[in-house]
Image: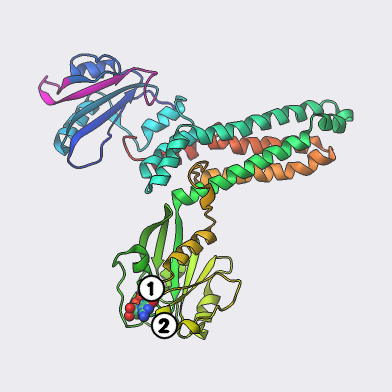
Amino acid sequence: MLSNDIIAAIATPPGRGGIGVIRISGRNLQSLAKAILDSIPHPRNAHLSYFLDENGHTIDQGIAIYYPSPHSYTGEDVLELQGHGGPAVINLLLSRCLQLGARLAEPGEFTLRAFLNNKLDLVQAESIGDLIDATTADAARCAMRSLQGEFSATIQTLVRALIDLRMLVEATLDFPEEEIDFLKSVHAATRLQDIRGKLERVLVSSRQGSLLQEGVKVVLVGQPNVGKSSLMNRLSGDEVAIVTEIPGTTRDTIQQLIQIEGIPVHIIDTAGLRETTDIVEKSGIARTHAAIKKADLTLLLIDSRYGLTDADQQILQSLPADLPLLTVFNKIDLLSESARIEKEPGKPIVHLSAKTGAGLESLRMKMLEIIGWQSNIAGEGIFLARQRHLQALNKAKTHLDNAIPWVENGRQLELLAEELRLAQTALSSITGEFTADDLLGEIFSRFCIGK
Ligand code: GDP
Ligand code: ZN
């Protein structure tokens, strides 16, 4: 996967700006630097220079910074040209680099090279993407901690403990008659439980991080006119959905991104789930079911004045059984205080008024509770995990679980050794020690160009 060619890209966003930055990376940039700048700048110093075309005419004037290998972002020679941020001038400069033998960088290719040259591990590389993509301040802070190596270090500690245990087990394999006594004497079972416990804690904080990073999808369902669009508008503080008196107005799904305690929450307002012959409404209903399939939580809205009707029951039955559900009794402003009764105690319920805003705060808290957000461990100690990390952690945990009976009865140590090996491989895939090329391709292709 390592390549010798020189890559170049505009690293600043498209459009006009105060400055525009071109980034170039390759094994040897001396001749390219000399051609554009007429001299090779002093390493890692801001160097005011003309940027020259092939005839020696000035394309632009700006700052050049030269980072000779290995002390650069990619580990190769890197040259950064900071010119004026107009699309025409920056493109001329990029063309000049291509003319001198560079090619356009793929998305994430600079970071890929940094990874391949051991400047970063995979978690850190991903955290750069996460930092750039972070939509909330908390997510950005978590990404920064991952970039600084906190998550990687935690994984490494687990991997090292596993390696120690594996060495003991594999050594025992050679002396079968003393297996049980030996494993006892080195407290193999306790060590395994200890690693498993630590892994469990990493999983908990990673799940929190994944909520912070990826957010949750919440779908609003309910009969026409129960107040889905009104609730969505209330939650987002914005007039996004059309609110009308005519049942069935929201014929399509409308999405809105809000934040609750720093967690990105995608709220999807849907068309009603009732039976219909109207074609437009039917396509809306198909989309509703598609949205529900991808949801993490459904809010079933009910008109408090009528309680749970047969039509509501029908909607309820059409929802997937394993999808978390919160029943929302709306329009409590139309009820007298005494008429409010808790129906179906034990099931998550809130009473509110989308019109007055009463009960909105308890709705937010209930939503967080259901999706598993633990405010007490928020902030420090959360790892901004991706699905990939969660899968690897879960896989490692499964193998450790499988290993426990073998270590306890001290028989079939080959199986114990194998489970430990698989657990280690799963964990190491997080930081990228054993990672297939196609996975790398997928991870880096999601980056922006120039990063
Ligand atoms: P949807 O069809 O479920 O999206 O319902 P809408 O949000 O369009 O609301 C239907 C009607 O109910 C509108 O006239 C809203 O103003 C009204 N409505 C929604 N929520 C409340 C509420 O909490 N209290 C009262 N009094 N009216 C509401
Ligand atoms: Zn609506």
Residue 276, numbered label: 2
Which residue is pictured at 34% across the width and 23% down the height? 26
Classed neighbour count for the residue bearing mark 2: other residues with Cα under 10 Å, few (<14), some (14–19), many (≥20): few
Q: Quadrant of the C terminus?
A: top left
Q: Which residues are magenta?
A: 49-74
Instruction: Determine whether 61 is above or below 405 in the image.
Output: above
Number of marks in the image? 2
Asked if residue 331 can be seen in this view, the reply is no
168 left or right of 283? right
Q: Report which quarter residue 90 is drawn in.
A: top left
Q: Quadrant of the N terminus?
A: top left
Residue 387, numbered label: none
Query: How far apart are labels 2 and 1 at the CA level?
Result: 26 Å
- Confirm whether the magenta stretch covers residue 71: yes
Q: Nearer the viewer, residue 318 or 242?
A: 242
- Confirm whether the magenta stretch covers residue 23: no
Check disc 1 and give the amino acid type: Ala
Image position, residue 36 (x, y; %): 19, 20
Image position, residue 319 (x, y; %): 53, 72
Check disc 2 and give the amino acid type: Thr
Image position, residue 39 (x, y; %): 20, 13
> SS for tag 2?
loop
For disc 1, does the CB lie below 8 Å from ligand 1?
yes
357 left or right of 192? left
Q: Nearer the viewer, residue 413 or 215?
A: 215
Which residue is pictured at 82% across the width and 32% down the height? 183
Instruction: Determine whether 111 is above or below 47 in the image.
Output: below
Q: Which residue is mark 1?
A: 354
Which residue is pictured at 32% across the width and 23% down the height? 78
Disc nearer the start of the sequence (2/1): 2
